[in-house]
Amino acid sequence: MSCDLLVCGLGPAGRALAHRALTHGLSVTVVDPHPDRRWTATYAAWADELPPWLPSAAVAATVANPAAWALRRVDLHRAYTVFDTTALQHCLDLTGAEIVADSVVEILPAHRDRPESVRLASGSVRTAGRVVDARGLTRSPARAEQTAFGVVVDRDPEFDTLFMDWRPDNGADAAAPRSFLYAIPLNEHSMLLEETCLAGRPALDTAELRTRLHHRLRSRGITVGADAPVERVRFPVQGGRPSRRGFGAAGALTHPATGYSVATALRTADDLAAGHSLWSPSARAVHALRLAGLRALLALPAQDVPVFFDAFFALPPHLRRAYLSGRDDLPGTTAAMSWLFANLPWRLRRTLVSATIGTRPPR
């Protein structure tokens, strides 16, 4: 049996695409080995990135002015939202879709009079007018990853929402790979305090991040109960290719230098459902620049990471927004990277140039 659209994978990206395709009147089949699995990760986004169709119930908390710390505190003056993960999953309703509990083992392109199709682990073949791969990315030693360890605690109204806090009070050696504190409200009663390795190849393991988090919290007089819920995070921040068939992380929609992807998937799902390309020449160029940004992050010596982010958070707000959210804003992304480069110390400029063009700086 054929359909208009077959979506492989039911994470946030795949589910968003299937949901929006249904609202466009398409016949939809979704394939996932565990289609009823509940999402447990914490997802967040800048409020101005959310599509207008997303119900307000999907948002658990909004902070008007989160802060960042590198060498100094900066107020970001951009509203930040944290999703209610369960509500978000429910909002992306799949009523009307055919849901197949199976694994896709091969995607077959259209050939002569045969439409696009997928071969499933069960041995069956499903055809469709279009097949989109939203199965995410597999881990690989060749791919940089983001890792984190967090605890959920009672919300303290006196505790800042911290987008990034690079202050060195987590007990790590000064020469060790850096990690930062991410502190966000989950709802009116609780908040997540998470020690995060932004990107590493290899990334810091969650056991090390747990040790750092508890050291940091103790140094700030914060007590965490032994039974506090925890969150462990590990996912690739690179991989996937800009293409007609891929979506979400599999389609290179993860920001390589931040790891954010959910809001981008929500915002672009309508265009892909309608059959539009997500990869204009500008979007491809921005993606290449972001990959260069990731190479630069990976090349930074540990002691210079706070210096880099001090300059980043000093960017004019419109340029900071362009780099974080403008996936097809080539002038804005270029201007942000140029401004940042011009405002870094010379020793970092040499490192970033060498990393960007794929060479190592001289020792």
Image (spheres, rainbow, N blue to C red):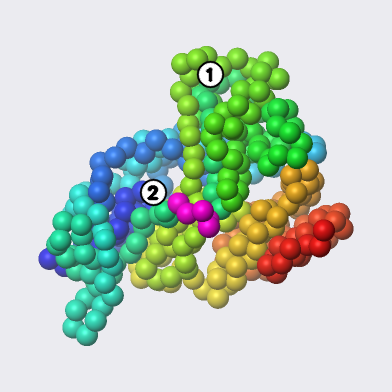
Name the residue rendered at 12%, 66% in the picture: 1
Residue lying at the far bottom of the rendered structure: 112
Q: Secondary structure at mark 1?
A: strand
Q: What span is colored magenta in the figure?
A: 139-143
Horizontally, residue 243 falls left or right of residue 224, namely left
Q: Could you tell me how far apart the alpha carbons at marks 1 and 2 are, in whole angstroms?
A: 27 Å
Please check the rendered image and state whether residue 140 is part of the magenta-colored stretch, yes or no.
yes
**Observer-nearest of 327 and 47:** 327
Task: Answer with mark 1 or mark 2, whichever residue precedes in sequence.
Answer: 2
Q: Position of residue 19 (x, y in %)?
A: 31, 53
Q: Amino acid at mark 2?
A: Pro
Residue 65 percent coordinates (x, y): 66, 37
Mark sitting on residue 154: 1
Q: Is residue 4 above or below residue 260?
A: below
Q: Which residue is mark 2?
A: 12
Q: Quadrant of the C terminus?
A: bottom right
